[in-house]
Every structure is written in C-alpha cells, then in structure tokens.
C-alpha cells in the first residue's frame, strides 16, 4: 500500500495511506497592495497562510475566493488572473487527509474603496504584512505563490 506525506494543522508530516485521501479543489486569494500582502496568522501554530477555502460543490473558484475576501474585508474584490496552482496534502482538524489542488488568484481592491480586516475564525487573524517581512519558514504553504504575486504586483506598478 502506498503512502503520501500529509501535513497536520501544526505543520508536522504524517504518512497517510494514499487510498484514504479525499480530493477537493481549493481557491486562495493573493492580495498585494502598497508592498503589503494579506495573509492569515494562525494563533495556535504561528503559521501564516493564504485566505481561501475548499470549493463547495458547484461553486467556481473565482466566486469562492471573492466570497472569502469579502468576508475578511467587507468589499467585493476584482478577481484577476490565476497566478499559480499547486497540490497540497493536508490533514484537517478532524484528522481527515486531503489532497487539495490549490488555485491562487490575484485580487484587487476596487478603486475608491477602503476596508477593515474582520476575523471570521477565532484561530485565524487576517493581517496586512510587508512583503519583505514574510519568509519561507513562516508560510504554511505557497512560498512560490508569494514570489509570483510580488512579480505580478511589480508588473502592474510599472505599467
């Protein structure tokens, strides 16, 4: 029987029988503005993670990522291009092993709007952090996505 290494909520690797994995697509937001990035800080583990969600049946990825961003900021974003995709293997808080295909979408705040960050989960605190502050060791997953987001932001700012 083959095994896959999944990561538990604390970031520890756990070997899991491949046949027990549940698959789901997931969508995550990449929002960078004024050299700051929106990330969630997990109060229990200390990890930074991307705002996002597994896709409920029938929901399109850009709708899901827009919904999550709206919950965190109170505004409906402009959903831009798909920046990156990656496969993640995680164990949720209930011990269920997941194979997630994560899609990372660029988001922009509509002009002439302001927002304030809202906590939707007591363990996950949304924060705008300087992009230079975020290190690979702080992110639970998706460091390459951070680099892609910075490159995309730089292209937009020089256009």
Image (cartoon, rainbow, N blue to C red):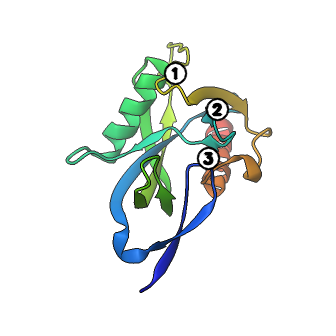
> Which of pointers 3 and 2 lies earlier in the amino acid sequence?
2
Which residue appears at 53% of the width and 13% of the height?
A: 114
**Which is closer to the viewer, label 3 or label 2?**
2
Residue 74: image quadrant is top left
**Residue on which the image places disc 1:** 119
10 Å crowding of disc 2: few (<14), some (14-19), many (20+): few
Give the Cα separation between the discs numbered 1 and 3. 23 Å
Give the Cα separation between the discs numbered 3 and 2. 24 Å
> Which of pointers 1 and 3 lies earlier in the amino acid sequence?
1
Q: Nearer the viewer, residue 45 or 49?
A: 45
Describe residue 3's horizontal placement relative to residue 54 as left or right: right
User: Residue extending furthest left?
Assistant: 58
Describe residue 41's horizontal placement relative to residue 55 as left or right: right
Q: Marks 3 and 1: in contact by CB < 8 Å?
A: no
**Residue on which the image places disc 3:** 149
Which residue appears at 35% of the width and 56% of the height?
A: 25
Give the percent coordinates (x, y) of residue 44. 63, 36
**Residue on which the image places disc 2:** 43
Q: Is residue 8 above or below residue 158?
A: below
Quadrant that contains the C terminus: top right
User: Residue extending furthest bottom?
Assistant: 1
Q: Classify mark 3: helix, strand or loop.
A: helix
Q: Is residue 127 above or below residue 112?
A: below
> Which of pointers 1 and 2 lies earlier in the amino acid sequence?
2
């Amino acid at each position: 029987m083959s095994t896959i290494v999944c990561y538990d909520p604390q970031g520890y690797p756990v070997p899991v029988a491949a046949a027990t994995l549940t698959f789901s697509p997931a969508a995550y937001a990449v929002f960078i503005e004024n050299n700051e990035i929106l990330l969630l800080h997990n109060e229990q583990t200390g990890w930074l993670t991307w705002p996002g969600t597994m896709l409920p049946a029938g929901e399109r990825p850009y709708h899901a990522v827009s919904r999550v961003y709206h919950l965190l900021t109170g505004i409906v974003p402009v959903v831009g291009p798909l920046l990156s995709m990656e496969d993640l293997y995680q164990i949720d808080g209930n011990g269920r092993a997941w194979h997630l295909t994560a899609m990372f979408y660029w988001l922009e705040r509509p002009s002439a709007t302001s927002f304030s960050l809202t906590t939707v989960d007591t363990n996950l605190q949304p924060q705008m952090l300087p992009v230079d502050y975020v290190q690979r060791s702080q992110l639970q997953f998706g460091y390459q996505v951070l680099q892609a987001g910075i490159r995309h932001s730089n292209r937009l700012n020089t256009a």
